[in-house]
Image (spheres, grey):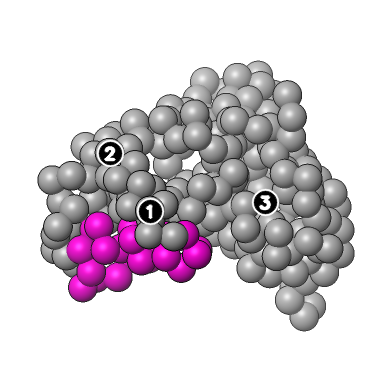
Amino acid sequence: MAKAVEIKNLRKEYGAKVAVNNISFAVEEDTLFALLGVNGAGKTTTIKMLTGLASPTSGDAIVLGHSIVKEKDKVKEIVNLSPQETSIAPNLTVRENLEFMAGIYGMDKEKIARRTQEMIEMFSLAEVEKCRAKTLSGGWQRKVSIAMALITEPKLLFLDEPTLGLDVLARRELWAVIKRLKTEVTVVLTTHYMEEVEALADAVAIMVNGEVKAIGTIDELLAQTGKQNLEEAFVEIAANA
């Protein structure tokens, strides 16, 4: 299977602090890859480098054939990020938010209309498309935020804590949406919900103090630790790293 991301000794320093310490791993195309770790483990910094929002101190990553060091602008064209903080304009309607994002990326009117309608259908947004974003529940806002990231037709989509703060039903609904995304795009997910990873992920990497301490399928991590579920395996790896 082709590689969507190949990380090669990637390192990021902020002064004397090493946020990401020479990590190396790969993400296969057309999969959902979960990047796990406690707060401060280096997940967000890694994503910032892979999306061109931060430059590495050393090392490199090849994102769909393009170097994040030498071809940062090209990488930005083919990836997108749905951040933890829902990034939608509160006073615009759902449809207006989608059209606005498509316009930022230079789409012509015909393509804006087509892609907006595709996102409304994919995310089942028809019943709220005329509602101002600020009136929507958290679950609806997260759907809109992910749709805004996907409307730009990225080949690699990063989802940072996509279901943070949602109730159980809203979380499960969003899981169904994320599962469908794998038919459209490679997805890299960060989350603190282990059940979410068990439901969605094809492969998992666990970061501790800026380093990748374990990587593999969920079954492989369970076999490695001798634990019965991912949460226990995660605690075992993180606590003993």
Placement of 235 over or under 85, stated as above or below: above
Mark 2–mark 1 Cα distance, whole angstroms, equals 17 Å
Q: Which residue is mark 2?
A: 121
Q: Which residue is mark 1?
A: 110
Disc number lying in front (2 or 1): 1
Magenta region, residue range: 84-107
Q: Amino acid at mark 3?
A: Val
Q: Return the mark for residue 167.
A: none
Callout 3: few (<14), some (14-19), or many (20+) C-alpha neighbours within 10 Å?
many
Q: Would you say 124 lies left or right of 218 here?
A: left
Q: Return the mark for residue 208.
A: 3
Coordinates of residue 98 in the picture (x, y in percent) = 33, 58
Residue depicted at 74% across the width and 29% down the height: 2
First reached walking from the N terminus: tag 2 or tag 3:
2
The quadrant of the rendering that contains the N terminus is top right
Placement of 166 over or under 108, stated as above or below: above
